[in-house]
Amino acid sequence: MKLSTRAEYGIRVLVALAHADGDRPTSLAGIARTDKLPHAYIEQLVGALRRAGLVTATRGHSGGYRLARPAEEITLVDAVRALDGPILEMPCAGPADLESCDRPQDCSVHEVFERLHDSLSGMLGGTTLAEVAAGTGGPPYPPAVRRRVVAAHSKSTAAPSADTPPPN
């Protein structure tokens, strides 16, 4: 599964608004400049976030955007659904969607897709903008997963040594 650029940039905008949670609205131009995001594109995304009730807009010279609710009340699943629609778009991905699946009822992969849907929804639904903005990012990785993530990141950012041939 790949998170769309639409969802990624939208979450970045929401996190920037969570950081700026103050008395004044935040301009999209400022967010675009700070986070190196395309201004025209995030303008489109903010429209979807407004329709979903996640942000509000103020017009005028001092206008901009704010979170519609406290960052503690907005989860990543809210953002992803507002920007991309269903978490796992498959006929039988959710437990209630089995009836709409055109496969036989004894489908061998339904349970796997249902668990995947529940896992993604649970992780995204259990992570708030406040956690992401604070840098905690929600529940921690289990130790074994954390070691793999850190090791993979270290390999990808390490400068190649003189003994290492350049990648193809």
Image (tube, rainbow, N blue to C red):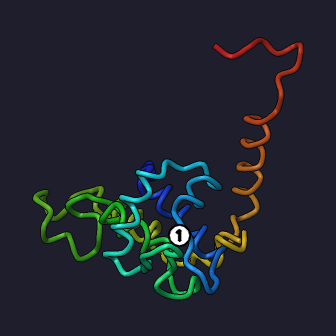
Position of 123 compared to 78: left or right? right
- Image position, residue 23 (x, y; %): 62, 86
SS state under label 1: helix
**Residue 77, picture quadrant:** bottom left
The quarter holding residue 60 reads bottom left
Point 52% across, 87% down: residue:
73
Instruction: Give the percent coordinates (x, y) of residue 168.
Output: 63, 13
For disc 1, the marked residue is 14
Residue 45 locus on image (x, y percent): 39, 61
Left-right relation of 166 to 109: right
Residue type at mark 1 is Leu
Q: In the picture, residue 53 is in which quadrant?
A: bottom left
In the image: residue 162, left or right of residue 143: right
**Residue name at image x 89 percent, y 14 percent:** 162
Badge 1 density bin: few <14, some 14–19, many ≥20, Cα 10 Å: many
- Front-most of 56 and 54? 56
Mark count: 1
Q: Residue furthest front?
A: 61
Q: Is 73 situated above or below 142?
A: below
The residue that appears at 28% across and 59% down in the rendered structure is 89
**How far from the left and from the top, in percent, is residue 15?**
59, 69
Residue in front for this viewpoint, 30 or 48: 30
